[in-house]
Image (tube, rainbow, N blue to C red):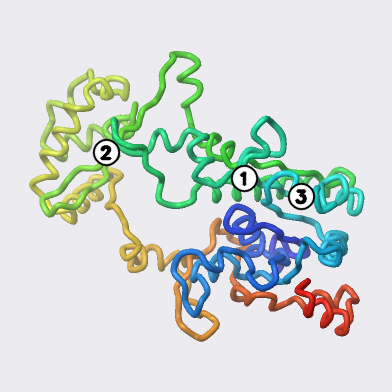
Amino acid sequence: MTKPLEGVRVLEMGQLIAGPFAGKMLAEFGAHVIKIEPPGSGDPLRKWRLLHEGTSVWWAAQSRNKESVTLDLRSPEGRDVVRQLVAQSDVLIENFRPGTLEKWGLGWEELHALNPGLVMLRVSGYGQTGPYRDRPGFGVIGEAMGGLRHLSGETDRTPVRVGISIGDSLSALHGVIGILLALRHRDQNGGTGQMIDVALYESVFNMMESLLPEYSAFGAVRQPAGSSLPGIAPSNAYRCSDGKYALIAGNGDSIFRRLMELIGRQDLADDPALAQNDGRVKNVERLDAAIADWTLHRTLNDVLAALNEARIPAGKIYDVADIASDPHYHARDMILDAQLPDGTPVQLPGIVPKLSATPGTVNTPAPTLGQHTDEVLENLGIDSTTRDAWRARGII
């Protein structure tokens, strides 16, 4: 089966999350991704979080379907190899600090002149322009600047992070969208590539819904609201008799009526002041109290069973053990069985999005450091004697 990105050649020069996550998605849908890593150490992600046999199990998910080539980009020889690979590539992904590639003679202008069809994704904390461009930026900083950190947590408490590096992943997703748009433009309009400038904070800010319009129109500064959904009611986490929490979203007009009837509050269901969301928001504390009184006398399983029967959106708060054992995850191939290099079994996340005719696949496991260096360099015409000399000098 031909995959949607089959024949697309990608050179990945990014590290950690934002750039490599974009490369992962492209590889899952058929792109040929060659990842450049520093000799000896490799991508720092290899040492992040929990390690097995010295390598992060995260690496097994982030780098599947890729090839690994080690190159010292500080050396003239390493940069020359990059130029040769760029000449053969459709896409280049990088997430160095702005100016780093220019310092090495590998900036957009030089690479575009070398390969006019190249699409170049550049992910950085603040973008390639503007007064903050030279500042180092990690996902957590972009999440704060983009407005997310201020909204996370409880009122009058220290703002909390989401729990994952969501800013990096959101930037990668925006980068993939940009790559696909640029490839479409190139193939439809004369074969010229372009540079895609993705900033971490902008990727987060793009998710901030009505935050800015509400501020500009009303001077409203949205505040953290814990487990509730501000301005949309009722929607909250409600404690059950067994100490667990049910997430209940009764904020649709007809859904709200069914919810009130289910919990025995026909008076609230029939109240015209609560028929639409704006009226319910004014009475949200009253509604939350009524729902909480109902859930506190029932176990989580009983609450969810009743809500599902009444067609009211509800669910529990999953931890990873819940995810790994959930039949719906398995039925939709979101838990994939794989092996680490020594044969140890490991479960990895499935592939999103799901295409009906050309779905993504996992064809090869994450590479060992430099696993494909000799093969790729040999294909460029660099002989074994030269490669041995370069290896001795630490260039590869």
| Amino acid on which disc 1 is placed | His
Is 273 situated above or below 28?
Answer: above
Q: Measuring 82% from the left and 76% from the top, which residue is drawn there?
A: 390
Q: Check disc 3 and report the residue beneath it.
A: 120
Task: Report which residue position mark 1 lands on.
Answer: 174
| Frontmost residue, 316 versus 147 | 147
For the C terminus, the quadrant is: bottom right
Q: Residues within 10 Å of mark 1 (few under 14, many from 20)?
A: many
Residue neighbourhood size for the residue with mark 2, other residues' Cα within 10 Å, grouped as few (<14), some (14–19), many (≥20): many
Residue furthest to the left in view is 297
| Residue 391 sits in quarter | bottom right
Measure the C-alpha gap from mark 2 to mark 3: 43 Å
Q: In terms of secondary structure, where does tag 1 sit?
A: helix
Task: From the top left corner, tell me how far across and down residue 378 is, in percent.
Answer: 85, 78
Q: Nearer the viewer, residue 107 or 312?
A: 107
Q: Which residue is mark 2?
A: 236
The numbered mark, 1 or 2, whose residue comes first in the sequence reads 1
Q: Which amino acid, by three-letter code, is at mark 2?
A: Asn
